[in-house]
Amino acid sequence: MVISSRLVTDTLSIQFPLSVMALFLHFTCPLKNGIHARPASVIEEFTHNLTSTITLYNNRTGTQANARSVLDMVAADVRFADACVIEVSGADEVGDKDRLQQFIGNELPSSDESVAAPITAQDQVLPRMLRNLEFTHFWGTVVVPGLARGKLVQWGVLGVSPTIPLHGERPGIDEVALVQTGLERLAAEYDDRLKHSHTALETALLKAQRAVARDPAIPSRVRQEMKTHGYTAAGAICATEQFISQQLLATGNPLLAERALDVRDVCLSLLKILYGESAITTAAALTEDSLVVAETLTPGQLLGMDRSYLKGLILTHAGTTSHTVILARSFGIPTLVQVKGIGAISPVTAILDGELGLLVTGFNDTVNRYYAMEWSRREQYNARIAGLATKPCTSAGGRVFEIAATLGTAAEGTAAFDGGAAGIGLFRTEMIFMGRAAAPTEDEQYEEYSKVVTAAQGKPVIIRTLDIGGDKPLEYLQLLAEENPFLGCRAIRLYGKLEMLFRTQIRALLRASCLGNLKIMIPMVCTTAEAQWVRQIITEEQGKLSAEGIATHPCVPVGAMIETPAAAFAIKGLSKYFDFFSIGTNDLLQYFMATDRANASVAHLYNLSEPGFLRLLQQLINEAHKHQRWIGMCGEMAGQIQYLPLLMAMGLDEVSVPCSVVPQIRDRASACDMQACEALLASALACDSANEVCSLLQAANTQLPQPILAPAQVILDVSLSNKTEVLKQLCDTLFIHGRTVQPRAVEEALWQRESTYSTAFAGGFAIPHCKSDAVTTNTLMVLRLKEPVSWTSDASEPVRVVILLAMRESDSAHAHMKVFAKLARKLMHDEFREYLTTESNPNLLCDFLRETLDLTA
């Protein structure tokens, strides 16, 4: 992103009538989604306390916007890479221009979270069990995956009660003043809710809506509607919502069109403040498990529903990036959007399939059986994963590898530990300091730290001290603008300038330390001089607390974030002052590659697979262990499952990952074969390019060798209706026990073989088989049916015993046929068939087959 500043008399290609003496900034929009409501609210919040008049110009569209009006900025339709100008005019224009330049360069690029790519129904292909069936279903786009069942509930568009007058004068009522008072009360309500916000998402959404509530465009439009059409306050608010929404829709930008929901939410909230809850016509309350169907849904409507009954959302016209969708994702509510052809609905029970992108409203026996199998698959997999949560995550050879959670608020702690987190590997304290007019007090911080330490119940909690500067400024600290803030005064480098703020945080942390296993971590440490100074501050504050009679833990571990090459090569000296280390991969890679990770033009260099970076990590981990220091990792790399085998082989002690992926990372780590991981690491370190490393990781299978046959792969005396159900059950079992993450791919590979020739054998046996790298472990599985099923279309003997043979494509070319040939020969013997047909003990059956077929792991 290029930013320039000069007197407006040198206007270059600017086409706007700017003030002659104003200052201005040229920049290109760095946001992939453009300036929609969330980033616009960040701009509004930043400019709210500046004294200058600030105007945003979009060169592409020829529009201008008041930078204190979210709606103005959204309507300007600023898209990614648009050339823009900000005009700054006023008594403090020089200072405000400098502050804006820092904001545009550092904070604006990170003001909008990336939106997860929606899952579309791939070519709208139904699974084998559902193909060629006549049942009522509708395709949509998955924005929140999951499986849900409930009664369909039509959620109508909210409107104003007929009892509320929309036109005409009301004696003794100043309608304009009424609206202004209501907006002030609404903004104050948002301020109050922000104080009690528990998550970064909730904070961002509340700030966006607060910005709309205090947007000057709303009262301005309301006054115009009253003057022109004689509306009352209620009528003018409704007309204003419609006018602004139509403006957003007219841009043709789907992302901006979705912001109309936020405007509607604010206007409805304003009506409730002015006229009470009865002013709004609402849909019926949810009273049982429900799938809500609506054209669109505002965030406020979603928040107002009883989520104990809300099982899924079907939004026929919504996009994939609305705040409603983002909220649904945070709540884990399965959601489909852009569902076509559904029309009017009746209150029937339906299923929302957030894997296929399907809403099923009509059922027959086969459809019911398919979803019964789907629920069973998910429940059994979740039960196996949940069972791991209470056990240490131990790799082959007995080395414990810790999977910890990264948190931004104390409220996330319960979910982290329920998911099996061994502790909190990184608790970011920035959220405690954000969204405020002043820094939090010692007592406020102590209360927040106490919550997460208490929730941990003795598990380690690593709390990082305030990491600000760079891309995370705090307005009330009034930090000076820097030419390159990522290389400037940030994190620990600010502590000397903000010593009392740092000492206050240390006091709060030390006080909370006596409640559990708290560890303090310092960000952005580069030198031993910094380390010595931090230790001195901690020692001094601990002494003061002791003198005041305030309890603390006598020996609180203190660690350092390793985020720069300088720190990576100073482990020996830093080990004299720090008890542990944690690698911050996001910054370490950025500084190692001299690459601004927010700069799209050099984004290709910001690659975690770069062999030189992997070598740096290995050297860093080795050095920490050489000096008897524990070392973990937080940041992007820690949560990416493809790098897990490398990190385990490097000897890392812990990874700290988002709460949502703790169970999956634990499952994969416990299944890793350390010898295979070490071999993969050796190959990766020998690569010459990131592309080579990526290819290596994609082809690798580092799963711990498992027996080709285990008791869990023996399923006895089950009731299934046909061959299609049998093959699905076999593949579902592979998934449940971690032998594939792509059960449908294995199922299709089996059907491809079946389409060539039947795998049925005489005597009521079948051996479906395939070779596919969708299988992570070579597997033999036995499934015995209560009642035999037809295996072919002719009148041949039905099958009662099914033996699955699923082998990896990349393994020995002959392994598949060796086992298959042995099976085929043994099935010719009556004694062999009789044993498989009658034995009821899975363990004995496994022993029999291993010995008879000479099976090895």
Image (cartoon, rainbow, N blue to C red):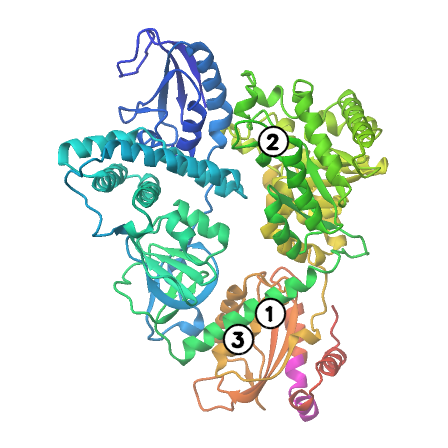
Single out the mark in the foreground, 1 or 3: 1
Give the alpha-carbon distance from disc 2 to disc 1, as whole Å: 45 Å
**Label 3: element kind:** helix
> Which class describes the residues within 10 Å of circle 1: few (<14), some (14-19), or many (20+)?
some
Q: Look at the picture and state if 27 lies above or below 854.
A: above
In this view, the residue in front, 629 or 767, is 629
Residue type, label 2:
Pro
For the question of whether residue 433 can be seen, the reply is: yes
- Quadrant of the rendering where the C terminus is positioned: bottom right
Give the alpha-carbon distance from disc 1 to disc 3, as whole Å: 17 Å
> Picture coordinates of residue 834 (x, y %)?
67, 92
- Quadrant of the rendering where the N terminus is positioned: top left
Q: Earlier in the sequence, mark 2 or mark 1?
A: 1
**In the picture provided, is 261 more to the left or to the right than 741?**
left
Single out the mark in the foreground, 2 or 1: 2
Point out which mark residue 727 bears.
Answer: 3
Q: Which span is picked out in magenta? A: 823-835
Residue 159 magenta-drawn?
no
For the question of whether residue 561 can be seen, the reply is: no
